[in-house]
Image (cartoon, rainbow, N blue to C red):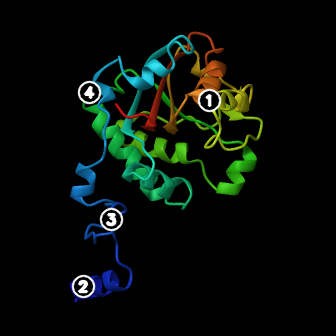
Amino acid sequence: MRTLFQDIIRFIYPHTCIGCGGELYNPKHFQCLECMASLPVTGFEKTQDNYTMNLFTGRLPLIKGGSWLFFEKDSLTQKLIHEVKYRGNKSLGEYLGYIMGLKMSEAGWFDDVNVLIPLPLNKKKLVMRGYNQSEILCRGLSLATGVPVEHVAVMRTIFTETQTKKSRIQRWRNVAEVFDVLEGAHLEGKHVLLVDDVVTTGATLDACGQVLLRLNNLKLSVLTLAVAHRI
């Protein structure tokens, strides 16, 4: 009887793969095995000399930097991120953070990290969107790694326009001096991992990281779900 009921529910409300639209029978999954296997993973967790880390060379003194997926226009990665960022699929965001945490933990990537900090949104944008996608990713990462999430230490004090269609120079100007640290004393001497969904030029992460590094003896690393670069 229960199986019949579940079949009826699946018929009325089909649970489908975000990637290909095929039916999924496990309600806890968001992708089929084929789409999961086709994700364009970077492998950056296996080497210190990677594109994300090198983006910040000479700008931010990072302990480590990495991204889990490559991002390209009209790709599966873009579809997943847009589903989280613009369509309110917070469960998917947490799931992606969790899988990213599991996969990168295999290389010991979180062994010496003390706290996760999601790249903050300005209050106006947070109200407009209803949530911070970077914080959603951090929830999943925390579940996979056991590293706690810090929600209030850093804030975005100025509302900025989207970076999506801006040039490299415009991106840097758009985020200059928009972050501030509140009650950050408990982060002094800690290894902090700053987390965002996508890195392109690194301008926003750099601006936030510079503020965090004002705290005494803070060690900083950067992780993003995806990087807009293809090797």
Mark 4 or 1: in front is 1
Q: Nearer the viewer, residue 208 or 147?
A: 208
Q: Earlier in the sequence, mark 4 or mark 3?
A: 3
Please state which amino acid type lies under the numbered disc 3.
Answer: Cys
Please state which amino acid type lies under the numbered disc 4.
Answer: Ala
Residue 168 circle label: 1
Query: How many tags in the picture?
Result: 4
Q: Earlier in the sequence, mark 2 or mark 4?
A: 2
Mark 4 or 3: in front is 3
Quadrant location of the C terminus?
Answer: top left
Quadrant location of the N terminus?
Answer: bottom left
Task: Give the distance between the C-alpha atoms of the residues marked 4 and 1, in whole angstroms.
Answer: 32 Å
Q: Secondary structure at mark 4?
A: loop
What residue is at 47 percent from the left and 44 percent from the top?
Answer: 137
Task: Give the distance between the C-alpha atoms of the residues marked 3 and 2, in whole angstroms.
Answer: 23 Å
Residue 185 circle label: none
Residue 15 placed where, x, y %?
A: 34, 72
Please state which amino acid type lies under the numbered disc 1.
Answer: Arg
Dot 2 crowding, Cα within 10 Å, few <14, some 14–19, many 20+: few
The residue under label 4 is 107
Q: Secondary structure at mark 1?
A: helix
Q: Earlier in the sequence, mark 3 or mark 2?
A: 2
Q: Secondary structure at mark 2?
A: helix
Task: Give the distance between the C-alpha atoms of the residues marked 1 and 3, in whole angstroms.
Answer: 35 Å
Q: Nearer the viewer, residue 111 or 33?
A: 33
